[in-house]
Image (tube, rainbow, N blue to C red):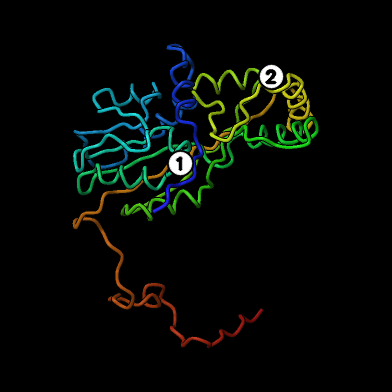
Amino acid sequence: MTNPPRLTDRSALAARRRRIAPDADQFLHAEAADEVQERLSEVNKSFTAPLLIGAHSRPFRALFPRSLVIEDVDRLNVTPRAHDLVVHAMALHWADDPVGQLVQSRLALRPDGLFIAVAFGGQTLHELRSALAAAETEISGGLSPRVLPMADLRDTGALLQRAGFALPVADARRMTVRFPTLKALAADLRAMGETNALAARNKTIPPRRLFARTEAIYRESFGDADGYLPASFELVFLTGWAPDESQQKPLRPGSASARLADALRVEERPAGDQVAPKPR
């Protein structure tokens, strides 16, 4: 068995999270926590033993004050079948092995326990990616990893099935936040612990003109009429249940007891028959 390629410098990521100020505005985490709370309110079930994965997210810790809280390390510190709810909070996009994170989360659930994850998706910061790539190519003639690659919605939905969850659902919420400067955008990313912690990042100090040129290209390509820099963020939500015999299951092909034609009150025709067009 081969290990997955190393995407994240975990030491660097931990250092960035430790530097999050106690009063930092983790507004995107707050939006994600509100969305999770709304989804849980629609579930006809109470949870008594929740687990929160992602200790760096204050809004989620406030939402689940009585939960067990653990770090999103490669090998999760979980007890099998100990929880009826597992919430993976704003950390899955940093995982080297996201399927492994999901499998470990499922194993931590009791039968019919609920799993919810929220993470940044593939449309996040596409404007910044484009501007940075253009500026760096222009200045140095090449590219270095500076923004975390994030999975598309379809890819993340498939991960739930691979991890063995029942009734898997993946959906996304997209939003645009306007910033007066590139420095302001970087400050908010720093406040959430989301600055560059890629294992393959260039560790030398970049030239100052790189970011000045990035902001200029950003404004030329994406700036709005009011002089702001729009930044796209995509929050991907993954929901699944630990398998249990009590859950609904799809019918076997051919086991239906009623015909679709009868339900629609139309005449059933053999395959290949064509319906004559309606007279005008």
Q: Is mark 1 on a helix, strand or loop?
A: loop
Tell me if residue 136 comes above or below residue 249 in the rendering.
above
Residue at point 27%, 76% (across, down): 257
Within the image, what quadrant is residue 203 found in?
top right
Q: Nearer the viewer, mark 1 or mark 2?
A: 1
Residue 145 is situated, as x and y percent measured from the top left of the image, at 62, 35
Q: Nearest the camera: 88 or 71?
A: 71
Residue 69 is situated, as x and y percent measured from the top left of the image, at 29, 27
Q: Is mark 2 on a helix, strand or loop?
A: loop
Dot 2 amino acid type: Thr
Within the image, what quadrant is residue 136 found in?
top right
Tell me if residue 193 comes above or below residue 276 in the rendering.
above
**Is the C terminus in the top left, top right, bottom left or bottom right quadrant?**
bottom right
Residue at point 73%, 21% (across, down): 207
Residue that mark 1 sits on: 96
Q: Nearest the camera: 243 or 147?
A: 147
In the displayed structure, does residue 214 sit left or right of residue 164? right
**Is the N terminus in the top left, top right, bottom left or bottom right quadrant?**
bottom left
In the displayed structure, does residue 67 sit left or right of residue 238? left
Q: Earlier in the sequence, mark 1 or mark 2?
A: 1
Residue that mark 2 sits on: 181
Dot 1 amino acid type: Asp
Residue at point 47%, 27% (across, down): 13
Residue 101 is situated, as x and y percent measured from the top left of the image, at 36, 42
Residue 269, numbered circle: none
Q: Nearest the camera: 143 or 203?
A: 203
Tell me if residue 226 comes above or below residue 163 in the rendering.
above
